[in-house]
Image (spheres, grey):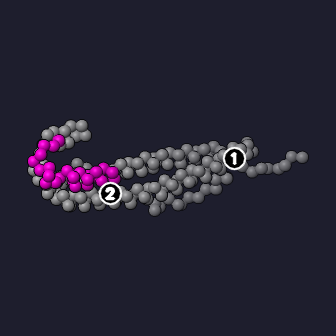
Amino acid sequence: MAAGEKGQQIDLGSLSTQQLSQVKKQLDDEVQHLSNSYQNLRAAQQKFRDCVVSIKQGVAESVRDKPLLVPLTSSLYVPGKLSDTSHVIVDVGTGFYVEKTTDDAQKFYNGKVEELGTNVKELENIVNGKANNLRVVEEVLRQKVLAGPQGGQGGGEGG
């Protein structure tokens, strides 16, 4: 839980429609940004799952010394042969690569999948909370717009 997460409570009824519109826009932007982050985390989690599958299926004795294509970039592959089925090179982030046994590599990637899973769940809760706040602001704004240009309080009654 972040420090500023639950620090500020505002009575939405006391805000003008312009202020409510600004709050709505800010919440819209936050929900959009958090949703994009959520999608990115899910994509990263799937990439790590794919790495585990690649290790299980692609680094086996059955493919030893058979021709295969080695990715140098996302669009450039070169021919190669798998000479060692017990060790792989693992990208541990920021351009660093480490040689690991296939078991250690699978543990590494499974750990990443679990870590991202925790982050995804936390972010999902935050997104849901922001989306609920957005719905409340939209409802108050709708009520104020329907009430007309009276502003905040309904002043005195005419005779």
Q: Is residue 35 left or right of residue 111?
A: right
Q: Earlier in the sequence, mark 1 or mark 2?
A: 2
The residue located at (32%, 57%) in the rendering is: 113
Find residue 111 and report its horizontal and vertical position in percent.
Answer: 29, 60
Q: Amino acid at mark 2?
A: Val
Residue 101 falls left or right of residue 6: left
Dot 1: few (<14), some (14–19), or many (≥20) neighbours within 10 Å?
Answer: some
As helix, strand or loop, the secondary structure at mark 1 comes to helix
Q: Residue at x 61, y 56 (%)?
A: 10
Q: Which residues are magenta?
A: 45-69
User: Mark 1 — residue?
Assistant: 144
Q: Which mark is residue 113?
A: 2
Residue 126 in sight from this viewpoint: yes
Q: What number is the disc on residue 117?
A: none
Residue 54: x and y, percent?
23, 51
- Lateral position of residue 74 relative to residue 145, left or right: left
